[in-house]
Amino acid sequence: MNPTSFAALKLSPQSLQALDRAGFEHPTPIQAGAIPPALEGRDVIGTAATGTGKTAAFLLPIIERLAGKPGTRALVLAPTRELALQIGEELERFGRNRRVGGTVVIGGVGLGGQKAALQEGRSVVIATPGRLVDHLQQGHARLDGIEVLVLDEADRMLDMGFKPQLDRILARLPKKRQTLLFSATMAGEVADFARAHLREPVRVEVARSGTTAARAEQQVFLAPQTEKLALLLALLERDDVSTLVFTRTKRRADRVAKGLDRAGHKVARIHADRSQAQRRSALDGFKDGTYRVLVATDIAARGIDVAEIGHVVNFDLPHVPEDYVHRIGRTARNQASGRASSFTSPEEQDLLRAIERLTRAPIPRAEVPREEATFQAELARTAREGPLPSGAPRAGRQAQAARRSSGGRGQGARPGASAHHSAAAGSGEGAKPRRIGSWSPRRR
């Protein structure tokens, strides 16, 4: 089914008006496939690449079902604070005129305000699993009235080690409910989880599991750890597009951001040791162009919703191949185009091969610009002052351990914890970065 209008999906006039006000003209494939069975009350498994409109695909049916009903009747679970906040913003946009409101329950902020909001009985609770378990343990939340459960980015939640929290939450839910599960990949643990908790689901697969963003121009640079910062600076000199840089560790993100700031780039960073206010400020600044570059760990791989990111850089390859799909899904969203560059050191070759097995295609190799002045200048500075700490994977690390640690402990172990709040990276001078791609609000 691939209708050309939202009206063909049998949405109400109120929803059609909300979509029109938001600039949504035509449903995306995941919306066209998932909304009709969700409106019928069926369980749904939606497999689609990041940035294809999954949020509206589950929020619109929820709003249709809950309009005019009192009490908390829907629960949406998401892996990261950023993603939960963005879902909350979308619910506000589409549900406001139907009086379907929500509360966002995440770590990094106090329990008191969330407790009050939960006890108000708003229609939808949007939560990260760990923080919701905190509230359940303290008796702040009741889930016995839930009619609809949404598991957004289910594969990421399981990768981050949230299965014990998910099991505890699902034990509190009515067995008779509708469950909507959305994931960019569908294999292994997430497939087992779906079989255990969904009833005769309708499967909507927009892209084959492991498929990368079609409009993302991918390239790999084979470079040792000592050359990675020089390589990044050289690539940034080639254009002025907004750039998202992924590193493996929090300390690594801090060091890369410091190096970029020293070179005069306007840069911010987000990772698990940043406070919620710092993370929100960095993300907002990246969205509005205050910062050209955002350096992030995988905690942000599913939580960054920026219309046009021109370039995604894997400064370090991820331990989990599926995370590559999510990382580069940050560029070439919807109808946009973009570029994804991956830096691969000799000790990361096995990770690169695992990614290419998952995506079923070799990633083109690109030449390292060792003759460019920016590259040589950074190498000379490194020779004087020393390189960044290595971000190479430790030898012998087991794959399962990597899956559990790839997003940092963050919300996985202590959902509300906000650790050491480091100072923000400085911002260099210059104009706001030029955005690229064909995205526009009317085509969202």
Image (tube, helix red, strand yellow):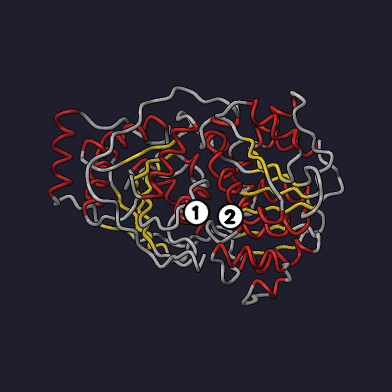
Tell me the amino acid under the disc marked 2: Ala
User: What residue would you read off at disc 2?
Assistant: 184
Could you tell me which secondary element the residue under label 2 belongs to? loop
* Placement of 386 over or under 332, stated as above or below: above
Most extreme residue toward the bottom, as rendered? 4
Q: Which residue corresponds to the image point at 74% horizontal and 25% vertical from the top-left?
A: 137
Taking depth in this image into account, of 227 and 395 the one nearest to the observer is 227
Q: Where is residue 142 drawn, in percent x and y?
A: 80, 34
Direction from residue 313 to residue 326 in the image, left or right: right
Q: Number of labelled discs?
A: 2
User: What residue would you read off at disc 1?
Assistant: 325
Taking depth in this image into account, of 155 and 172 the one nearest to the observer is 172
Q: Where is residue 245 drawn, in percent x and y?
A: 37, 45
Direction from residue 221 to residue 186 in the image, left or right: right
In the drawing, what numbered circle is on residue 262? none
Quick check: marks 2 and 1 in contact, CB under 8 Å?
yes
Taking depth in this image into account, of 56 and 175 the one nearest to the observer is 56
Q: Earlier in the sequence, mark 2 or mark 1?
A: 2
Tell me the amino acid under the disc marked 1: Val
Report the Cα–Cα distance between label 2 and label 1. Answer: 8 Å
* Placement of 429 over or under 418, stated as above or below: below
Quadrant hosting residue 27: bottom right
Task: Determine crowd level at label 2: few under 14, some 14-19, many 20+ residues with C-alpha closer than 10 A.
Answer: many
Q: Which residue corresponds to the image point at 56% horizontal and 47% vertical from the top-left?
A: 86
Q: Is residue 396 visible?
A: no
